[in-house]
Image (spheres, rainbow, N blue to C red):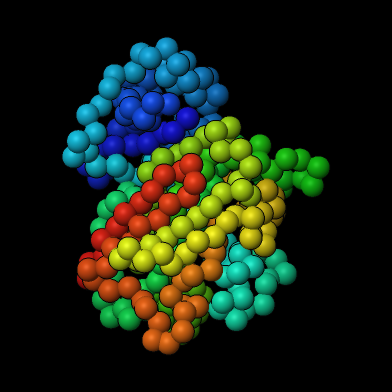
Amino acid sequence: MKLLRVGTAGAERPALLDAEGTLRDLSGVVDDIDGALLADDAALGRVRAAAEAGELPVLDATGLRIGPPLGRIGKIVCIGLNYHDHARETGAEPPAEPVVFFKAADTVVGPNDTVLVPRGSVKTDWEVELAVVIGRTARYVADEEDPLAYVAGYAVAHDVSEREFQIERGGTWDKGKNCETFNPLGPWLVTADEVGDPQELSLKLWVNGELKQDGTTAEQIFPVAEVVRYVSQFMVLYPGDVINTGTPAGVALGAPEPKPFLQGGDVVELEIAGLGKQRQEFKDA
């Protein structure tokens, strides 16, 4: 299923994109698309049954804002330097273990919402990423288990980053990762059964119409299953938590000088095969 949330910011309602590409209203079946729904097999079953029966009302998509596809996000765990080609372009050694950092849930905006270039920023960068949405509580996932059984679905994430704040201003990466609007998510949460193998997805990103990133999740140093297993050894993953799994080569940080960092007025588009496309205009904060 392709689940999404539509409407004005803070007042989104649940919806579904059916197999014919028609937008359907889910608000008569469930209250929201969130961790509580993803952990409730019976509720998900009702959504599937209603979709298959053609009972869901049609929504007019004209002028309708698409919000983040997941409400009440618990935490966003991010994996850095997780693509072989991205590590090469930035001159970094592939990590021996996943590099873990966090983004606050309040950085999340809709897939087509405006993204703000922070005040004083000269190194705002782009990163298309596969987002993993947790559907079952994952605590110390064992080696013999299937970590993907804990995944409810996947989405497109834009891990916008300010490289000066991240790398040159001391401390951890968090200052360059948690600026306002720095995690557009969506348009859809696509359930895991529809995605199949998460290591066979193409990722692309354009800046002002120029293709900058053209990668595949096959290049991940730590695949999705290992990321879920690994992270669960250090923290509990709850339904509605999100993991951003890293970005392929092609970011501004890895480009020759002068590096083409983002400015107000730039337009970024990104997509992952089967998971939809985002488009953001960048404006000065």
Q: Residue 277 appears at what percent x and percent y?
A: 38, 48
Query: Is residue 135 visible in this depiction of the protein?
Result: no
Number of marks in picture? 0
Q: Residue 141 appears at what percent x and percent y?
A: 72, 45
Q: Is residue 285 left or right of residue 241?
A: left
Quarter of the image containing the C terminus?
bottom left
Compared to residue 104, the image places residue 23 above or below, namely above
Q: Is residue 109 left or right of residue 245?
A: left
Q: Residue 197 appears at what percent x and percent y?
A: 63, 42
Query: Closer to the camera, 228 or 239?
Result: 228
Q: Quadrant of residue 138?
A: top right
| Residue reaching furthest to the left | 63
Q: Residue 4 appears at what percent x and percent y?
A: 37, 36
Q: Is residue 90 left or right of residue 265?
A: right
Query: Is residue 114 visible in this depiction of the protein?
Result: yes
Q: Residue at x 54, y 64 (%)?
A: 248
Q: Residue at x 48, y 37 (%)?
A: 190
Q: Is residue 76 left or right of residue 9?
A: right
Query: Closer to the camera, 41 or 140?
Result: 41
| Residue reaching furthest to the bottom | 257
Compared to residue 67, the image places residue 16 above or below, namely above
| Residue reaching furthest to the right | 144
Compared to residue 50, the image places residue 76 above or below, namely below
Q: Residue at x 40, y 56 (%)?
A: 270
Q: Residue at x 55, y 33 (%)?
A: 194
